[in-house]
C-alpha cells in the first residue's frame, strides 16, 4: 500500500484549509469533500483517502465547537441522544465497511443529500415570513425521531468513513424545525463525537495514513474556527441559502466523482 509522498504535502495542506473552513461554516466534518479532493489533487490512494480525514474531522469540529459554545447554540438533549445512539451505530458501520458495497452507498447517500438540498433551497426561497431564529427547547424535541436518525446517520457515517455532519444538520433543519445556526452547532459537535469511534475502528483496520491526517489537522483546525465565526455573524437567510446550495453542489460532485472513480 503506497503512503503519501512528500511532494504532495502542499495540496493536502490546502485541502485542509478549504475543508476546515467549510466544516466550521456548515457544521460538518468534511470527509465527503476531502476524500475525493485527496485523490484528485494529491494523488492519494483511494484506500487512505476515505478514512484518513477522520482524525482531522475531530480537530476541525472541536475548533468550531468553541465558537458555537460561546453563542449558547447547543441543545443538550440533541447532543446526548445523538451521541448515545450514534456512537455504537458508527462503530457497527465502520466494522461493516469492509463487507458492504461502499461505492453504491456513496452514490445513494449523495443523491439523498442533493434531494435534501433542493427541498431546503425551495423552502428557503419560497418562504415569505420572517425567519424564525428562536432556539428549540429540549422539551419540544421528539426523542423517537432523534434516536432513529442517530442510529441511521451513525451507521452510515461509520460505513462511509464520514463524520455525518451534513446529514445531522439537514435532519435538524428539516425534521426538527431547528433554526439553522442551532442545527449547525449541534451537528458540528456530534460530528466531532462520531469521528472518534470511526477513526479508531478504521485505524485498527489499517485505513488511515497518519501523515495525511496530521497535515489536514494542521490547517483544518484554525480554518474551521474562522468558518464557524463567519457562520454566527452571517445573516440567517443568506446562511440558509448557502447551506442548501452547498448540499446540492457537494452531492452532485460526489456522484460524478464516485461514478468516474
Image (cartoon, rainbow, N blue to C red):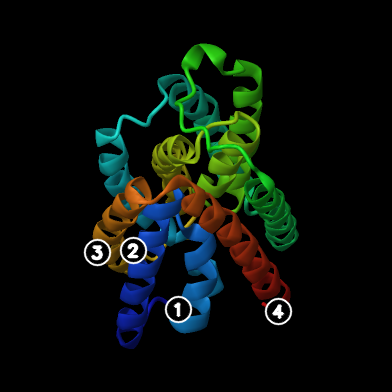
Q: Considering only vertical position in the picture, is 71 above or below 110?
A: above
Q: Quadrant of the C terminus?
A: bottom right
* 3D distance between C-alphas at marks 2 and 1: 13 Å
* Residue receiving disc 1: 2
Mark 2 and mark 1 lie on one chain; the one further toward the N terminus is 1
Q: Secondary structure at mark 4?
A: helix
Q: Secondary structure at mark 2?
A: helix
* Residue receiving disc 3: 218
Query: Between tags 2 and 1, which lies in front?
Result: 2
Q: Considering only vertical position in the picture, is 28 above or below 78?
A: below
Query: Between tags 3 and 2, which lies in front?
Result: 3
Residue 192 x, y percent position in the rendering: 39, 42
The local crowd at label 2, few if under 14, some if 14 to 19, many if 20 or more residues have their Cα within 10 Å, is: some
Residue 237 x, y percent position in the rendering: 51, 48
Q: Are marks 1 and 3 in contact (CB under 8 Å)?
A: no
Q: Considering only vertical position in the picture, is 93 above or below 149?
A: below
Viewer-proximal residue, 242 or 144? 242
* 3D distance between C-alphas at marks 4 and 3: 30 Å
Q: Are marks 3 and 2 in contact (CB under 8 Å)?
A: no
Q: Name the residue rendered at 61%, 66% in the picture.
A: 249
* 3D distance between C-alphas at marks 4 and 2: 27 Å
Mark number, residue 210:
2
Residue 6 occupies quadrant: bottom left
The local crowd at label 1, few if under 14, some if 14 to 19, many if 20 or more residues have their Cα within 10 Å, is: few
* 3D distance between C-alphas at marks 3 and 2: 12 Å
Mark 1 and mark 4 lie on one chain; the one further toward the N terminus is 1
The local crowd at label 4, few if under 14, some if 14 to 19, many if 20 or more residues have their Cα within 10 Å, is: few
Q: Name the residue rendered at 75%, 56% in the picture.
A: 108
Amino acid at each position: 500500500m503506497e503512503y503519501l509522498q512528500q511532494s504532495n504535502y502542499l495540496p493536502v495542506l490546502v485541502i485542509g484549509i478549504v475543508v476546515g473552513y467549510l466544516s466550521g461554516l456548515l457544521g460538518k466534518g468534511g470527509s465527503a469533500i476531502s476524500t475525493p479532493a485527496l485523490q484528485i489533487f494529491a494523488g492519494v490512494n483511494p484506500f487512505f483517502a476515505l478514512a484518513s480525514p477522520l482524525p482531522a474531522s475531530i480537530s476541525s469540529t472541536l475548533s468550531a465547537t468553541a465558537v458555537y459554545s460561546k453563542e449558547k447554540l447547543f441543545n443538550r438533549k440533541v447532543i446526548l441522544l445523538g451521541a448515545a445512539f450514534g456512537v455504537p451505530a458508527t462503530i457497527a458501520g465502520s466494522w461493516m465497511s469492509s463487507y458492504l458495497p461502499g461505492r453504491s452507498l456513496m452514490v445513494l447517500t449523495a443523491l439523498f443529500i442533493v434531494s435534501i438540498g433542493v427541498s431546503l433551497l425551495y423552502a428557503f426561497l419560497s418562504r415569505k415570513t420572517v425567519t424564525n431564529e428562536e432556539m428549540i427547547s429540549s422539551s419540544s424535541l421528539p426523542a423517537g425521531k432523534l434516536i432513529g436518525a442517530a442510529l441511521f446517520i451513525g451507521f452510515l457515517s461509520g460505513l462511509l468513513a464520514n463524520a455525518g455532519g451534513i446529514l445531522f444538520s439537514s435532519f435538524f433543519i428539516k425534521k426538527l424545525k431547528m433554526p439553522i445556526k442551532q442545527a449547525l452547532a449541534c451537528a458540528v459537535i456530534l460530528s466531532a463525537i462520531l469521528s472518534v469511534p470511526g477513526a479508531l475502528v478504521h485505524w485498527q483496520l489499517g485505513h488511515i495514513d497518519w501523515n495525511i491526517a496530521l497535515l489536514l489537522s494542521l490547517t483544518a483546525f484554525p480554518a474551521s474556527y474562522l468558518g464557524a465565526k463567519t457562520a454566527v455573524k452571517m445573516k440567517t437567510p443568506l446562511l440558509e441559502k448557502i447551506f442548501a446550495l452547498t448540499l446540492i453542489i457537494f452531492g452532485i460532485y460526489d456522484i460524478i466523482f464516485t461514478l468516474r472513480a
